[in-house]
Image (cartoon, helix red, strand yellow):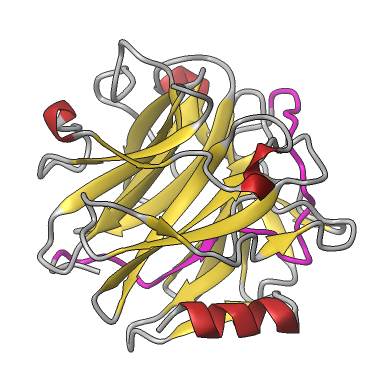
């Protein structure tokens, strides 16, 4: 994923069995508290980073920031308190949907705070993540669900959701600091356009993009997270800034038992550029096998 040094990671775009489909927040947590989790990890919008043999899980839950959990086997988890605390960043509420990437020895967290997209940096995946200049990435507009993609030529892009005609996925180039959006490059990617997405309300969100055999693949969520019809769709493009085509057999996952489709699938991409799908039912795996040429 680009020429910069980026750690091998696991991106959890959906729900692991060990995670709850949780969308609320709880009260303040001790910033450095460590405890073993004996039940499901209560994270919405979950993301997992694999770094030096340890899995780090982040997500929507705490009222005062972003929690971090660790595991060696994706089964037993320890809570380490807040990786990101509101005192260290812009905004003081609604901390959602974090993604964490290691770039040149630093850890970048892209997240939503008070319905604005933000980025903070730390020296460790445990944090503390801080902003030297406390501000959102785009001050004048509410946006959510930011997701980083670095292409094979090293150029960074950010995908995010804008609130125009419902929730729509957009993309923009980033400056070489990985923190500054080139606003003049902002382009729309996908909007509500298939019947399954129109149940309630007009929502395409939670995108994640990877590249495979020269083709860009996007997974995204459709309908409201409060709806039992919240589901996962897929789209492809030959040009990351160009037109995206939705998969005709969408949704690839919807109403899977008692789980909600919170942000697409559990996708692990490793150094040999193989792609593995975990935790998906047989029918979903077969669809993805057809879809990812």
Residue 63 percent location from the top left of the image:
66, 24
Q: Which contiguous range is marked in magenta?
A: 4-28
Residue 248 percent location from the top left of the image:
54, 64
Which quadrant would the C terminus be assigned to in this image? Answer: bottom left
Q: Main secondary structure of the magenta part?
A: loop
**Going 13% across and 55% down the picture, which residue do you hit?**
155
Q: Is residue 252 left or right of residue 11?
A: right
Comparing 22 with 163, the one in front is 163
Count the labels in the image. 0
Which picture quadrant has residue 270? bottom left
Comparing 115 with 219, the one in front is 219
Q: Is residue 8 left or right of residue 103?
A: right
**Going 33% across and 50% down the picture, which residue do you hit?**
148
Q: Is residue 55 magenta?
A: no
Of all residues, the one furthest to the top in this rendering is 140
Which picture quadrant has residue 119? top left
Residue 276 in sight in this render: no
Which picture quadrant has residue 164? top left
Q: Is residue 7 magenta?
A: yes
Q: Is residue 141 above or below residue 172?
A: above
**Going 52% across and 45% down the picture, which residue do you hit?**
206
Which quadrant would the N terminus be assigned to in this image? Answer: bottom left
Residue 38 percent location from the top left of the image:
86, 59
Comparing 226 with 42, the one in front is 226
């Amino acid at each position: 994923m680009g020429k910069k040094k980026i750690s091998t990671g696991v991106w959890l775009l959906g729900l692991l069995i060990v995670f709850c489909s949780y969308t609320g927040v709880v009260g303040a947590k001790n910033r450095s508290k460590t405890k073993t989790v004996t039940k499901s990890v209560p994270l919405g919008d979950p993301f997992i980073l694999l770094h030096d043999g340890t899995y780090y899980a982040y997500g929507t839950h705490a009222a005062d920031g972003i929690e971090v959990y660790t595991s060696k086997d994706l089964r037993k988890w320890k809570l380490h308190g807040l990786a990101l605390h509101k005192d260290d960043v812009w905004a003081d509420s609604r901390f959602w949907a974090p993604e964490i990437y290691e770039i040149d020895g630093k850890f970048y967290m892209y997240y939503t705070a008070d319905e604005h997209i933000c980025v903070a940096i730390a020296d460790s995946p445990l944090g503390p993540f801080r902003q030297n200049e406390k501000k959102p990435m785009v001050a004048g507009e509410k946006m959510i669900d930011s997701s980083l993609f670095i292409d094979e030529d090293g150029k960074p892009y950010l995908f995010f959701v804008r609130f125009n005609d419902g929730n729509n996925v957009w993309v923009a180039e980033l400056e070489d600091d990985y923190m500054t959006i080139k606003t003049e490059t902002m382009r729309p990617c996908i909007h509500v356009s298939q019947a399954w997405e129109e149940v309630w309300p007009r929502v395409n969100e939670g995108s994640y993009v990877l590249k495979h055999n020269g083709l860009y693949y996007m997974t995204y969520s459709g309908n409201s997270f409060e709806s039992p019809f919240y589901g996962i769709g897929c789209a492809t493009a030959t040009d990351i800034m160009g037109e995206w085509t939705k998969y005709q057999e969408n949704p690839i996952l919807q109403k899977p038992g008692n789980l909600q489709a919170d942000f697409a699938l559990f996708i692990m991409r490793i150094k040999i550029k193989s792609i593995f799908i975990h935790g998906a039912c047989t029918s979903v795996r077969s669809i993805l096998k057809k879809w990812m040429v």
